[in-house]
Image (cartoon, grey):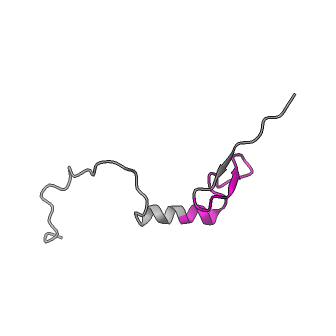
Amino acid sequence: MSQSQPTVVKCPTCKTDVVWGEQSPYRPFCCKRCQLIDLGEWADEEKSIAGAPDMSDADGWSEDTY
């Protein structure tokens, strides 16, 4: 019986090969550092999900009010 090859993906941050399995606790990232870099990019809004902006709650909002 042949064993199947493990799935290997690229770390989204540094592009290092990462085996997709229990031995890679930060998958799809290669390490905690790359995971935190990615989180920081989302928090700083350097990354976003494409789509139309939701302006439904912006009606009546003014910078002068706040």
Q: Which residues are magenta?
A: 13-37
Dominant SS of magenta comes to loop
The picture quadrant where one finds residue 44 is: bottom left
Image coordinates for residue 63, horizontal then vertical, percent: 17, 69
Q: Residue furthest right?
A: 1
Relative to 42, say whether 64 is above or below.
below
Image coordinates for residue 13, horizontal then vertical, percent: 58, 61
Residue that appears at 53% across and 61% down:
38
Q: How many marks?
A: 0
Taking 19 as reference, is 51 left or right? left
Q: Quadrant of the C terminus?
A: bottom left
Q: Residue furthest front?
A: 15
Taking 4 as reference, is 34 left or right? left
* Residue 31 shown in magenta: yes
* Residue 17 shown in magenta: yes
Q: Is 5 in front, or is 29?
A: 5
Q: Quadrant of the N terminus?
A: top right
Taking 61 as reference, is 36 left or right? right
Image coordinates for residue 65, horizontal then vertical, percent: 14, 69
Image coordinates for residue 8, horizontal then vertical, percent: 70, 47
Relative to 55, say whether 63 is above or below.
below
Residue that appears at 40% across and 56% down:
48
Residue that appears at 47% across and 64% down:
41
